[in-house]
Amino acid sequence: MTNKDLTIIITTFHSERRIENCLNSISHDYRVIIIENSRNIDFKNNIEKKFPNVECFIPLTNLGYSQGNNLGLEKVKTKYSLILNPDTKLEKNALENFFERIKKIKDFAILAPRYGQSYDDVASTDVSQLTEKIKKKELVEFNKVKGFAMFLNMKKFSRIGFFDHKFFMFFEEIDLCRRVKNHNEKIFLDPTIEIEHVGGESVDEDLVKSLEFTRNWHWMWSTFYYHKKYDGFLIAFIKVSPKFFSAFFKKLFYQLVRNSVKKNFYANRLSGLKSSILGEPSWHRPTLD
């Protein structure tokens, strides 16, 4: 296996300051596809000039995480792909260790790096054995892994399909992992692969507050949609009811005390949940000055 067998995909949105650390940690021998959702031509030109192994695509509209990654995956011609967040950094030998691992295993759909996965997600290993397995650098099978870095076996996904395009933000990798398991395919964590994840910093710092309303709208939309998809409308409604009433009464409270920022925050949550319950698409998009 060589660098010709792996393509790296990074979906971004105003991540100019964050992504350079990520790209600097990747050998220029690997092809990197960036999907930039902000329609920033200057970003495309600058990043492609600075990193000759990078090809940046700018869709006509903001596709979000799922459709953005799907667009990148459709352009992959290699056996494997690596989905990365822009706020990540590959530790030394991360990709070399991936290739060493897949020489020994063939039957996997997703391989994830070592990074604080929840013990609740362990599939076939007793939790009490997990720490010991990781110390010994042994593979651990999981039901789901975090989406900031996932190696995909492309052959498997020709049958499973890629991300559900209806998600714009949140629950995308949870849904993908669930479909992988429903197809009786395997998801592993590999302790020999280490990728640092800053977390919550995929967007440049000066835009974080502006995007908070969008995040909360989609958190509520995706929560209901995900549960409806797998559990049906009634169960989904029951599961989100506490969130609905919490947002409703907090909106009223902040309206009474004339805190317009907090009022709009919870109004946005209600709007996302209402749209999902009514079967509307995840239409909300960030408005940036």
Image (cartoon, grey):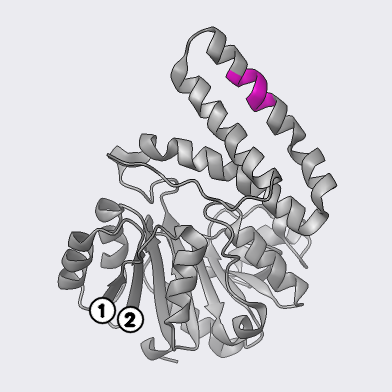
96 or 268, which lies in front? Answer: 268
266 or 176, which lies in front? Answer: 266
Helix, strand or loop for disc 1: loop
| Residue at 40% from the left image edge and 75% from the top image edge | 8
| Any part of residue 142 in sight | no
Q: Amino acid at mark 2?
A: Tyr
Magenta region includes residue 250: yes
Q: CA distance from mark 1 to mark 2?
A: 7 Å
Mainly helix, strand or loop, the magenta region? helix
Horizontally, residue 157 falls left or right of residue 59, namely right
Picture quarter with the C terminus:
top left
Image vertical order of residue 187 relative to residue 122, above or below: below
Horizontally, residue 38 falls left or right of residue 173, namely left
Which residues fall within the magenta stretch? 246-251
Query: Disc 1, disc 2: CB below 8 Å?
Result: yes
- The picture places residue 174, in percent across and down from the top left corner, at 64, 59
Tell me the crowding category of disc 2: few under 14, some 14 to 19, or many 20 or more residues within 10 angstroms, Cα based. some
| Residue at 62% from the left image edge and 45% from the top image edge | 221
Image vertical order of residue 39 relative to residue 219, above or below: below
| Any part of residue 248 in sight | yes
Q: Amino acid at mark 1?
A: Asn
Picture quarter with the N terminus:
bottom left
Residue 53 tag number: 1
- The picture places residue 175, in percent across and down from the top left corner, at 66, 61
Earlier in the chain: of badge 1 and badge 2, it is 2
Magenta region includes residue 143: no
Q: Which residue is mark 2?
A: 30
